[in-house]
Image (cartoon, coloured by chain):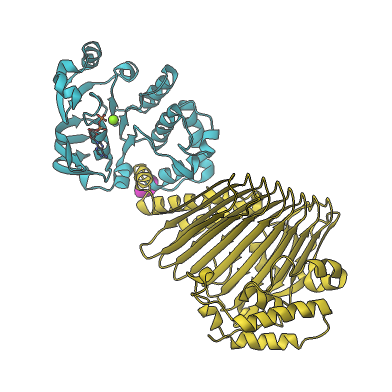
């Protein structure tokens, strides 16, 4: 496997100075790990259905200058028409202060690019960065840790409530070609704080590039964080992203992963319910066509009593697209009264589309309620006939039923402008229309 | 308008319709009655073009064209409408959107201009009143979570909006209370015109007090065994189906 380009980047990065000792140590651990293990192969259980070879063989280098021609007009389609939101814009992986907007300020809520956080929130960074997401657990996280140059830090003080959503918008244009970026996001939610954070990965062109993101979320007791990830990378891009959360007592973590972009994407959503009475809701929608490959790996670890987890992932695959869904739920012996539900439903629009779906429940407590269900289907003929009997053409009926299948899980998104926008996007995808259903 | 001759149909290799002859002229209302399992729904579904049923013989002409040759959506576009005995739930597609799509697809097929959402809403307002339905139903998914009565009303709403030339009502009355029954009948009667026809499939005579048929046919064991005027329905009500079908007919 050719990981040379990445190793060159790592070498260049370790020679970089001007960073505090703790950070250099953290990076060194990542660098060493990556150099030692390299990218996973399909012999690796977690990578059985997704080959990382196309990424390993990419001839891409870490982007140091953003370049590109991204303007306010080019980001407008991705901001949900919300001027009041705090929006940090990253162009080709690098923070762009000009395009970013401060939005409405909330007491106790600090949102800033990583570089600024190094100056102003060194304590927060030093405590949390790399403490949630184990630097050594896989090659992509190790690589991100060795190389991250930009990203964002969100700190929610005790009892702080972010009144408006916080949007981290990563946009790539033609200048991203042959580039790699390793965005790093840290969300620290202190006791009883609350926020909604969006992480968007979008593109204005069709460049080949690689995004390798890591987002760490720390939820203290009673904290509540909603994280919405929207992956609409260039159709020729490669995207690997990990969202890793640690939850304290009575905390609530809600995640939604929307994925339609990239030639190959892999999204990990992991959380540890590490205190009593907490809950995690992990939902997602993936839609792929052509030769796209879209992989979601979720892991919910129930460590303590009386916690719940809810998970619904839906997928629509066309042409020769390949989807992968793996939902792990791990219930520790002391996690009695765990209440877990997991569903994965995939609609195959073409006989050559493939889904590998695998629920994986490992339960070591005896007093638990855990269920899972996976369905893989095609358009329902009864519904199809009913619609046709009303004069709706076969094509249009299929489109509407496909939209309905996908939109079902979008209803889970509480943030109205995002839900409406994703519904419209989904409708347009299947009907070519933009009227709201 | 509709001319059925010697129609035979099977489902899962079992013959259900064994030679049906039925002619419906413009402006007429025909009632098709018969015991459970006699093939009433099969006839209705075959006319609508359900792919599960295979036509093995006979012919169906609609306005001089071969109906059986047409895809289900073409039949609807030409003016055939079936109110389903068991309306289908379509989670995720709102009633309003579905109806507007159907309405516009039919207009498009007829070379007419599509109607925009605002104008369509005006059309809907009026039709909703006719079936005494609340407009919150428009934003709910098609038939999803509707009660039995709501589903039947929704079928009539669709019919009222699409204004078919030939409406086939498959047991739209079953399970309805008297108020709902009146609503259904009003919907059908409001649509009556010299150039439109209706086939009312029913098990009971009750609905025919409100929708008065010109002809009544008794279907038993896949065949029409008796035809007559509206008084035949009353006679059936009084004497039971055994009177025309014999006890073995009812058991089929
Ligand atoms: N899809 C089907 N598959 C198998 N048998 C069917 C199907 N539809 C109808 N039948 C059978 O055909 C016969 C007539 O049914 P149907 O037309 O529904 O009668 P009716 O509407 O008069 O009660 C019944 O014996 C029924 O079991
Ligand atoms: Mg029936």
Closer to the camera in the image, A236 or B44:
A236
Question: Which chain does yellow denote in the image?
Answer: A
**Residue B236 position in % (x across, y down):** 22, 15
Residue at point 63% right, 44% down? Answer: A337
Question: Which chain does cyan denote in the image?
Answer: B
Closer to the camera in the image, B228 or A236:
A236
Query: Could one spot residue A229 in this view of the protein?
Result: no
Residue at point 28% right, 40% down? Answer: B48
Magenta span: predominant SS is: helix
On screen, residue A411 versus residue B105, left or right, reads right
Residue at point 33% right, 19% down? Answer: B207
Rendered image quadrant of residue B6 = top left
Closer to the camera in the image, B197 or A173:
A173
**Residue A124 position in % (x across, y down):** 83, 66
Examine the rendered structure and indicate whether residue A328 appears above or below residue A57.
Answer: above
Q: Which residues are magenta?
A: B107-111
Residue B109 falls inside the magenta stretch: yes
Query: Could one spot residue A151 in this view of the protein?
Result: yes
On screen, residue A83 versus residue B50, left or right, reads right
**Residue A360 position in % (x across, y down):** 52, 58
Rendered image quadrant of residue A32 = bottom right
On screen, residue B33 versus residue A172, left or right, reads left
């Amino acid at each position: 496997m050719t990981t040379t380009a990445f190793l060159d980047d790592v070498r260049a990065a370790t020679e970089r100075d001007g960073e505090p000792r703790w950070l250099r140590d953290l990076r060194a651990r990542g660098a060493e790990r990556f150099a030692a293990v390299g990218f996973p192969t399909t012999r690796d259980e977690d990578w059985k259905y997704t080959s990382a070879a196309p990424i390993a063989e990419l001839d891409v280098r870490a982007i140091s200058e953003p370049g590109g021609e991204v303007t306010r007009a080019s980001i407008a389609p991705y901001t949900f028409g919300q001027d009041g939101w705090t929006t940090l814009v990253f162009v080709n992986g690098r923070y762009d202060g000009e395009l970013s907007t401060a939005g409405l300020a909330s007491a106790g809520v600090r949102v800033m690019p990583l570089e600024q956080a190094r100056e102003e929130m060194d304590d927060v960074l030093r405590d949390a960065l790399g403490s949630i997401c184990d630097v050594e657990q896989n090659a992509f996280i190790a690589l991100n840790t060795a190389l991250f140059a930009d990203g964002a830090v969100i700190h929610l003080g005790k009892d702080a409530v972010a009144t408006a959503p916080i949007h981290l918008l990563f946009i790539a244009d033609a200048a991203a070609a042959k580039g790699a970026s390793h965005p790093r996001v840290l969300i620290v939610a202190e006791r009883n704080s609350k926020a909604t954070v969006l992480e968007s990965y979008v593109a204005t062109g069709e460049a080949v590039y690689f995004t390798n993101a890591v987002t760490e979320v720390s939820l203290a007791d009673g904290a509540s964080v909603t994280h919405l990830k929207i992956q609409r990378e260039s159709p020729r891009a490669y995207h690997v992203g990990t969202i890793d959360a640690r939850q304290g007592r009575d905390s609530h973590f809600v995640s939604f992963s929307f994925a339609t972009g990239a030639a190959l994407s892999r999204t990990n959503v992991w959380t540890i319910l590490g205190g009593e009475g907490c809950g995690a809701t992990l939902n997602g929608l993936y839609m792929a066509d052509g030769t796209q490959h879209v992989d979601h790996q979720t892991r919910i670890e129930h460590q303590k009593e009386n916690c719940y987890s809810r998970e619904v992932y839906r997928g629509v695959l066309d042409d020769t697209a390949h989807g992968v869904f793996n939902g792990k739920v791990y219930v520790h012996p002391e996690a009695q009264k765990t209440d877990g539900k997991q569903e994965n439903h995939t609609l195959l629009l073409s006989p050559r589309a493939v889904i590998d779906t695998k629920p994986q429940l490992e339960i070591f407590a005896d007093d638990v309620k855990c269920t899972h269900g996976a369905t893989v289907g095609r358009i329902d003929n009864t519904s199809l006939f009913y619609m046709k009997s009303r004069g709706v053409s076969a094509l249009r009926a299929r489109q509407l039923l496909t939209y309905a299948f996908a939109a079902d899980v979008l209803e889970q998104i509480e943030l109205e402008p995002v839900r409406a926008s994703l519904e419209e996007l989904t409708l347009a995808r299947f009907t070519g229309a933009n009227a709201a259903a | 308008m509709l001319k059925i001759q010697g129609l035979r149909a099977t489902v899962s290799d079992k013959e259900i319709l064994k030679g049906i002859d039925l002619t419906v002229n413009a402006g007429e209302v025909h009632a098709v009655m018969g015991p459970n399992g006699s093939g009433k729904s099969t006839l209705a579904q075959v006319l609508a073009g359900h792919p599960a049923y295979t036509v093995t013989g006979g012919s169906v002409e609609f306005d001089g064209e071969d109906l059986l040759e047409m895809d289900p959506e073409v039949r609807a576009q030409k003016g055939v409408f079936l109110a389903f005995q068991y309306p289908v739930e379509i989670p995720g597609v709102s009633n309003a959107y579905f109806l507007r799509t159907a309405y516009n697809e039919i207009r498009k097929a007829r070379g007419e201009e599509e109607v925009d959402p605002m104008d369509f809403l005006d059309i809907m307002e009026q039709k909703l009143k006719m079936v005494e339905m609340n407009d919150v139903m428009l934003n709910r998914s098609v038939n999803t979570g509707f009660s039995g009565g709501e589903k039947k009303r929704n079928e009539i709403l669709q019919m009222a909006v699409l204004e078919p030339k030939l409406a086939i009502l498959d047991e739209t009355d079953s399970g309805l209370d008297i108020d709902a029954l009146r609503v259904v009948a009003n919907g059908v009667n409001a649509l009556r015109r010299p150039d439109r026809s209706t086939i009312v499939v029913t098990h009971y005579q009750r609905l025919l007090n409100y929708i008065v048929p010109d002809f009544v046919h008794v279907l038993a064991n896949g065949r029409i065994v008796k035809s007559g005027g509206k008084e035949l329905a009353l006679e059936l009500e009084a004497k039971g189906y055994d009177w025309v079908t014999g006890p073995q007919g009812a058991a089929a």
